[in-house]
Amino acid sequence: MPDPRKPNERGAALLTVLLLVAVMSVVAATALERVALATRMTGNGGAIDQARAYADAGTQIARMRIGDLVASNPARITLAGGWMGTPQSIPVPGGIATARVTDGGNCFNLNSVVTGESEASLKVRPIGVSQFQALLQALGVDARQAQGAAAALADWIDSDSVAQPGGAEDETYAQAPRPYRAANRLMVDASELRAVNGITPAIYDLARPWVCALPVTDLSPININTLLPTQAPLFAMLLPGQLSVAQARQLLAQRPPDGYGSTVQFWAMPSLSGLSPMTEVAEQVKLTTGFFEVDVSVNVGGTQLVERALIDARENPATIVRRSWGAGA
């Protein structure tokens, strides 16, 4: 029997069916794509978890080795044995892990611009502020900018809300496009320096390789037996106006192969005879290292992860203070 519907009705029905098929095809393709994406994400997540586990294990091994290094001579840490900065690679299932240990105290401790027993009583330490200013100037920052940045750093950490001359407290940060407040506590990570008034992106990029945030307010503990000539600004900052970066570099290059036996021997060097360091500064120079930094890079099945940890070796056993993960940690 012939179809009683008109040809245009049959055409409309066919078009509807074709549209429905097209829509279902798109839905099916989208669903398949999401399933594939979820599968890839699950695989990536598993690879990252595996890489992190290997990185954690590498950090623990480094922590124990650091403990052994310090225990072998608690009074003196030198570069003997080539432990500092030398990559140590360890094969792991599906890839490789590489660990690197450096002296974690040879840096400007950002928390040294204050002193205090608790975060409720942190007060500005002028000598720490002046050392940060001296470091910035040694790196090429204008004296006025360096002074303001150093004062603002102390205001950022100290407990009160009274700005130093050239410094910054809450009222300054409240005027930012996205208002915020001074932390009024110790820094946990050196990256927090970016939030401090006067620390421009250019200044931050200059300063970042030279600064750290140790979990103490002690003046930067410079181990004269491990400080490299390339790190001369960290020694020059201790004696601003008395010792240039070039002179500090030459001094470090003349270090005995087995290091100095005592700080008295170091300060008695003829090249330092005309200098007059303050008692606090003289005591900053150490023969041993209390903090170490460990970088563990893991590559497993194309997944790369870096773990960076700060190790406190002042007591036995050495402990992990903090750690971070990422492409560059």
Image (tube, rainbow, N blue to C red):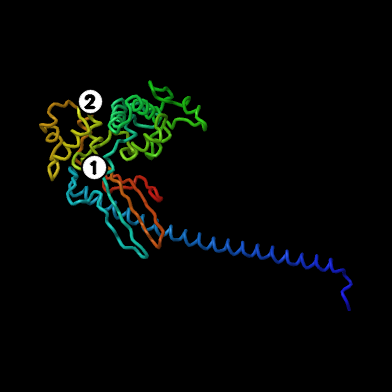
The quarter of the picture where residue 134 lies is top left
Q: Quadrant of the N terminus?
A: bottom right
Reading the image, the residue beneath label 1 is: 289
- Is residue 310 positioned above or below 94 on the image? above
**Residue extending farthest front:** 7
x%, y% of residue 65?
25, 53
Looking at the rendered structure, the number of numbered marks drawn on it comes to 2
x%, y% of residue 123?
36, 26
Label 1 is placed on what type of residue? Answer: Thr
**Residue extending farthest bottom:** 1
At x 14% / y 32%, what residue is drawn? 267
Label 2 is placed on what type of residue? Answer: Gly
Q: Disc 1 and disc 2: Cα gap in Å?
A: 27 Å
At x 35% / y 63%, what residue is drawn? 95
- Tell me if mark 1 has few (under 14), some (14-19) or many (20+) residues whose alpha carbon lies within 10 angstroms of its own: many
Q: Please tell me the numbered disc located at residue 80.
A: none
Report the side of 327 relative to 31 (left or right).
left
Q: Secondary structure at mark 2?
A: loop
Report the side of 271 relative to 327 (left or right).
left
- Is residue 192 positioned above or below 279 on the image? below
- Is residue 115 positioned above or below 252 on the image? above
The quarter of the picture where residue 56 lies is bottom left
> Which badge, 1 or 2, comes first in the chain's sequence?
2
Q: Secondary structure at mark 1?
A: loop
Q: Nearer the viewer, residue 13 or 129?
A: 13
x%, y% of residue 109?
31, 36
x%, y% of residue 86?
24, 52
Q: Nearer the viewer, residue 255 or 162?
A: 255
Report the side of 87 relative to 20 (left or right).
left
Q: Nearer the viewer, mark 1 or mark 2?
A: 2
**Residue extending farthest left:** 270
Q: Please tell me the numbered disc located at residue 241.
A: 2
